[in-house]
Image (cartoon, helix red, strand yellow):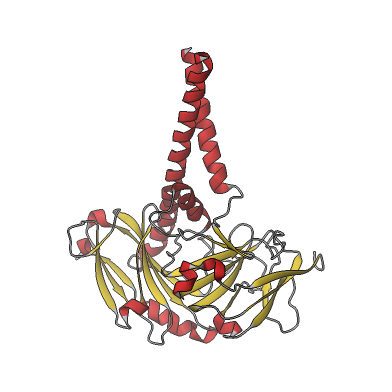
């Protein structure tokens, strides 16, 4: 009996351990690849990539929305805190800034509704004791979304979101 | 004995990795709650999502917002439970929804917008108005009816995004009157 139970137990234990390890590793791997692409594209624009409106011929992220303009900043807080300037639409359309850690967790969101129309400046830090928004991992993404409410709104939406900036305080 | 133990561990590791990859990259969908043809999962974007959902969302919906901000419903099937098919024509009809703004986006079976040159992959509240509406999802435009093109989309899906949803969307998604998806015909343009 033991000749069967011991190998079976070892098989099940290693099966579960390997499965769980893989499931936990997949988001970090996918996020890492996305961050590499964004860092490469954003290097020439001060760290922020103002992505063009999504079309069928310029897609890099699955299930993105063609009715949103995206601006994204890949950060690495090991080099210092990050200062963000976040503009909000003057015409009442939806906009938000969302923060993702290195494992894809959406750990914070601020939208125009909470901001009540005022442009916002905030500091992102990996130090839990700092008086700043706390990031659970040093690397991650800050993603600005701005709804395009109609074709006629595209220029205004594009002008709005170009006020979004990310600056590493280690650069200052 | 030791060789048998090592072999058991090796087999366990290999099949464990293979099973996890199949769950994430196979046909598994995100859905947890069903309402008609639509599925949603309250834990999308949440920090307390389990490892499987987190991995599936990373693959199929990277950078999703949490549900306080946006609730995502996705339909992979019509109202009768048949898989959506790019060669078929569907009548999609609905009405305004309890949210600040909403949009419908059609994705091909690779989770990207269909590459077909039609530029007819999304419609929003701005396009459809705040009353009852009807659209066609199919391989060809149908008169002046608002259209989502399914050409080259394979076993496609439609995602409904509700931005800044009212409480009822988060608390009782099964009670919502979501759009219906009715098959009209198939094979008219294959």
Q: Is B108 displayed left or right of A104 in the figure?
A: right
Query: Of residues B24 and A148, which is closer to you in this image?
Result: B24
Furthest residue in direction right, as rendered: B188
Against B120, residue B54 (above or below) is above
* Residue at image coords 43%, 60%: B45
Front-most of residues B132 and B156: B132
The part of the image, by quadrant, that contains residue B94 is bottom right
**B124 on left or right of A84:** right
The answer to whether residue A39 of the structure is visible from this angle is yes
Q: Is residue A69 visible?
A: no
Q: Is residue B61 toward the left or the right of residue B75 in the image? A: left
Q: Residue furthest top?
A: B1
Q: Which residue is located at x 28 percent, y 76 percent?
A: A120
**Residue A65 on image: x %, y %:** 52, 69
Image coordinates of residue A127 in percent, x first then y, are 20, 56
Q: Is residue B138 above or below residue A12?
A: below
| Screen quadrant of the C terminus of chain A | bottom left
- B129 vs B33: above or below: below
Badge count: 0
Residue A40 in the image: x percent, y percent? 40, 59
Tell me: A161 left or right of B141.
left
Percent x, y for residue A88?
Answer: 35, 80
Rendered residue at 53%/17% (across/down): A4
């Amino acid at each position: 009996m033991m000749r069967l139970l011991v190998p079976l137990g070892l098989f099940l234990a290693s099966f579960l351990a390997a499965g769980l390890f893989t499931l936990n590793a997949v988001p970090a791997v996918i996020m890492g690849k996305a961050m590499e692409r964004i860092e490469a594209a954003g290097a020439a624009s001060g760290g922020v990539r103002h992505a063009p409106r999504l079309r069928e011929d310029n897609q890099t992220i699955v299930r993105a929305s063609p009715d949103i303009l995206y601006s994204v900043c890949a950060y690495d807080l090991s080099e210092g805190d990050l200062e963000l300037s976040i503009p909000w639409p003057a015409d009442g359309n939806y906009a938000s800034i969302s923060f993702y850690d290195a494992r894809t967790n959406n750990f914070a969101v601020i939208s125009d509704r909470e901001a009540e129309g005022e442009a916002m400046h905030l500091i992102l830090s990996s130090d839990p004791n700092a008086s700043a928004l706390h990031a659970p991992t040093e690397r991650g993404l800050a993603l600005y979304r701005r709804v395009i409410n109609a074709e006629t709104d595209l220029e205004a939406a594009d002008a709005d979101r170009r006020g979004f900036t990310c600056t590493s305080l280690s650069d200052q | 004995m030791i060789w048998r133990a090592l072999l058991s561990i090796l087999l366990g590791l290999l099949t464990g990795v293979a099973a996890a990859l199949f769950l994430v990259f196979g046909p598994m969908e995100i859905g947890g709650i069903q309402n008609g043809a639509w599925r949603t999962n309250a834990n999308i974007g949440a920090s307390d999502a389990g490892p499987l959902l987190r991995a599936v969302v990373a693959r199929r919906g990277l950078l999703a917002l949490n549900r306080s901000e946006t609730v995502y419903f996705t339909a992979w099937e019509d109202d009768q439970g048949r898989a959506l098919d790019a060669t078929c024509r569907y009548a999609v009809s609905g009405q305004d929804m309890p949210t600040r703004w909403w949009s419908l986006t059609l994705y091909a079976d690779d989770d990207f917008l269909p590459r077909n040159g039609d530029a007819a992959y999304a419609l929003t509240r701005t396009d459809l108005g705040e009353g009852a509406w009807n659209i066609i999802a199919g391989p060809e435009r149908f008169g002046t009816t608002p259209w989502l093109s399914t050409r080259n989309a394979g076993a496609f899906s439609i995602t409904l995004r509700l931005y800044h949803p009212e409480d009822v969307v988060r608390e009782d998604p099964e009670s919502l009157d979501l759009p219906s998806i009715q098959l009209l015909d198939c094979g008219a343009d294959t």
